Amino acid sequence: MYKKQYILMNYDEGKQAIFLNFDASKNQPTMIIRQANITDSASIVEFQLAMALETEQLQLHEPTVVKGVAAVFADPSKGIYYVAETDGRVVGSLLTTFEWSDWRNGTVLWIQSVYVRPEFRKKSIFSRLYKHIQEKVANNANLRGIRLYADKTNTSAHGVYEHLGMTAEHYQMYEWMKE
């Protein structure tokens, strides 16, 4: 039997997006996009460990990741986590960090640490998180845009980003990391 669904986007007083995906037969919300808080740390750490293993076959040192996530919550100048929550369970997250652009005289948000639980993939979780960030940028005169980097081999992620209107453009990223 076909069930009509509605997707609404509201903002609460703290300006967090609340995406309400209503099943007309149940009339119950199934998804909230919000700024993360310290109680979400365990989920975020779990996601970072899983992402590194999935995308780069890296086994991260968990105590280091725990400290890294805690550092963001302790110092918001390092970044802001956002989570997608359904039925009280965090099912996806991302981190935004800040790049000052002298060319644009404003801040560009970088999206990092994107993860969606495998059983929730292909359900527009990242799209909803991204649209939340995009709305924040669109409504803030000091924010100039959004950037992210993706592993070259993660072609499914590239397709999602392009579908959302992002372009690979003309930059290539290089890095040097201390061991």
Image: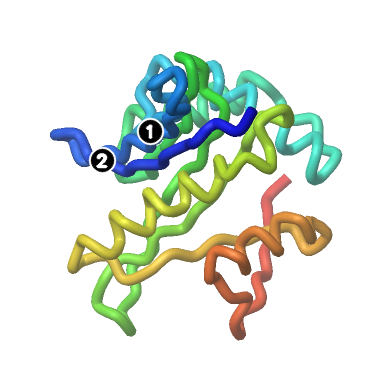
**Cβ atoms at labels 1 and 2 below 8 Å apart:** yes
Q: Which mark is residue 20?
A: 1
Hey, what amino acid is under mark 2? Asn
Tell which of 37 and 91 is nearer to you: 91
In percent of width and height, residue 34 lies at 35, 33
Indicate whether 150 appears above or below 122: below
Q: Is residue 15 left or right of residue 41?
A: left
Rendered-image quadrant of the N terminus: top right
Indicate whether 97 appears above or below 115: below
Q: Is residue 11 left or right of residue 173?
A: left
Q: Is residue 161 left or right of residue 58?
A: left
Indicate whether 10 appears above or below 164: above
In percent of width and height, residue 81 lies at 42, 37
Mark 2 falls on what kind of element? strand
Residue appearing at x 40%, y 30% in the figure: 32
The quarter of the picture where residue 107 lies is bottom left
Tell which of 3 and 108 is nearer to you: 3
Tell which of 4 and 68 is nearer to you: 4
Residue appearing at x 83%, y 59% in the figure: 153
Q: Which mark is residue 10?
A: 2
